Amino acid sequence: MKKTQFDILAGKTKLKKRALRLAEMVLVDGMTATVAGKKEGVTRQLAEQAVNRILRELKRQGKCPQEWRVITTVLPEHMAQVMEWIESKEREAAGLTLESKPYTPDLEPRDVELITRMIGEWRKKK
């Protein structure tokens, strides 16, 4: 997401300065919520909440892909990193962020099996 677009959306929210910094680090700078949270000394969840608030405003204005939705979920850390990576790639593809940081999640074999199974089920539905 471009900084100018972020500033417009942020101006329509009641987010405090820290939440705005967190959301900007993720949406404009391309950081993961985990990294942004660590930089600000807060949890990943707080960073995600700030991002979600900006994305809700984007969607409310009809400028976010209609089929997208904002969710909050609780996962083990390694799977949360996988989901953040997937999210950053999707945002990048939709033009909502700068090029994502080169990061590949460190996956256990059971994680690869789970994701492979999930993708297989998803493809069956298409």
Image (tube, rainbow, N blue to C red):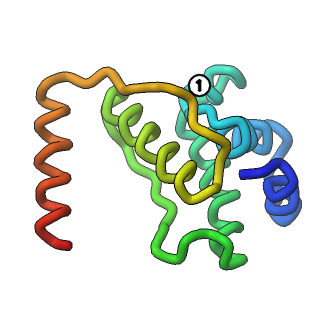
The amino acid beneath tag 1 is Val
* Residue 110 in picture, x, y percent from top left: 12, 29
For the C terminus, give its image quadrant: bottom left
User: Could you tell me which secondary element the residue under label 1 belongs to?
Assistant: helix
Against 62, residue 54 (above or below) is above
Against 121, residue 19 (above or below) is above
Q: Nearer the viewer, residue 119 or 19?
A: 119
Identity of the residue drawn at 64% across and 29% down: 36
Identity of the residue drawn at 60% across and 49% down: 49
Query: In the picture, residue 28 is in which quadrant?
Result: top right
* Residue 14 in picture, x, y percent from top left: 82, 58
* Residue 59 in picture, x, y percent from top left: 63, 72
* Residue 29 in picture, x, y percent from top left: 71, 36
Against 72, residue 59 (above or below) is below
Structural crowding at the residue carrying mark 1, measured as other residues with C-alpha within 10 Å and reported as few (<14), some (14–19) or many (≥20): some
Identity of the residue drawn at 41% across and 44% down: 86
Residue linked to disc 1: 35
User: Is residue 70 found left or right of 98 in the rendered image?
Assistant: left
Identity of the residue drawn at 61% across and 69% down: 64
Please tell me how many numbered marks the rendered image carries. Answer: 1
